[in-house]
Amino acid sequence: MRFEKIICEAYGSFTISANGPMIIRSTVNTKLTPENADAIFIEGAVDEKNNAFLIPGSSIKGVVRHYLTNGYNDDVIENLFGKVKKGALKSKISFSDAFADMSTIKTSMRYQTKIDAISQGASKGSLNSILAVTQGDFKCDYRIRNFSADELELFIRAIKAFDSGEICIGGRISRGYGMVRIKDFNIVISNGYNENLEPKIILKSQNVTELEKAIPEIKAKFYES
């Protein structure tokens, strides 16, 4: 079984910080509330009384997988992210929904229109409004189980790609939306369990560069599948 025995595990969190306009569109119908924008940011319940903007974990996982697909064969990607066709394979990596710290959120109403392919002018009746997040922090938890050191390096590459602008989040990316930065990164890596069933922690880090430097040690200690 793929996870019958937990050989190694990495877990932690990071903050996705908007570095410009970002919109992950809610499926809530705003046509009956004309005062609202045509596109509003998706929300979720933080507790019984409060909601907050969120970036779905499936969206984070999806953009990371899409980015890493370029340059690696299908077997490498499917081994880390899993698959549902031609023999289901459970994913080694997971991301939680990233809820916003609403005290950090700033929004702006943006307007855009469709450009007519022939006239190169604005298409009649195509003007729509977008309530975009222009600033704010979203905290995400993650976990990777039974990974190889090479797969951990893929994860590091993806985290760095957010900062470099190679990975964007949300819709309207072609219009410059979705640029983010990663803050407050932290990771704990364990290599099996001791006789008291406590994880044997070999690395705690709050720095991606430090994690990169530890890869040779991880390769020496971890079981490579």
Image (cartoon, rainbow, N blue to C red):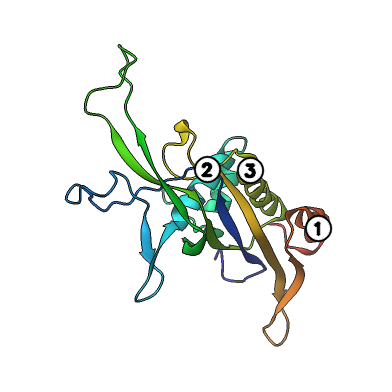
Q: Earlier in the sequence, mark 2 or mark 1?
A: 2
Check disc 2 and report the residue beneath it. Answer: 20
- From the image, which quarter does the N terminus lie in? bottom right
Check disc 3 and report the residue beneath it. Answer: 161
Label 2 Cα neighbours within 10 Å, binned few <14 / some 14-19 / many ≥20 = some
Find numbered disc 1 in the image and state the secondary structure of the residue it sits on. loop
Relative height, residue 21 to residue 216 (above, below): above
Check disc 1 and report the residue beneath it. Answer: 214
Of circles 3 and 2, which is in front? 2
Q: Amino acid at mark 1?
A: Ala
Residues at badges 3 and 1 in contact (C-beta under 8 Å)?
no
Mark 3 to mark 1: distance in Å? 19 Å
Q: Residue 116 has which mark?
A: none
Find numbered disc 3 in the image and state the secondary structure of the residue it sits on. helix
Mark 3 to mark 2: distance in Å? 16 Å
Label 3 Cα neighbours within 10 Å, binned few <14 / some 14-19 / many ≥20 = some
Mark 2 to mark 1: distance in Å? 33 Å
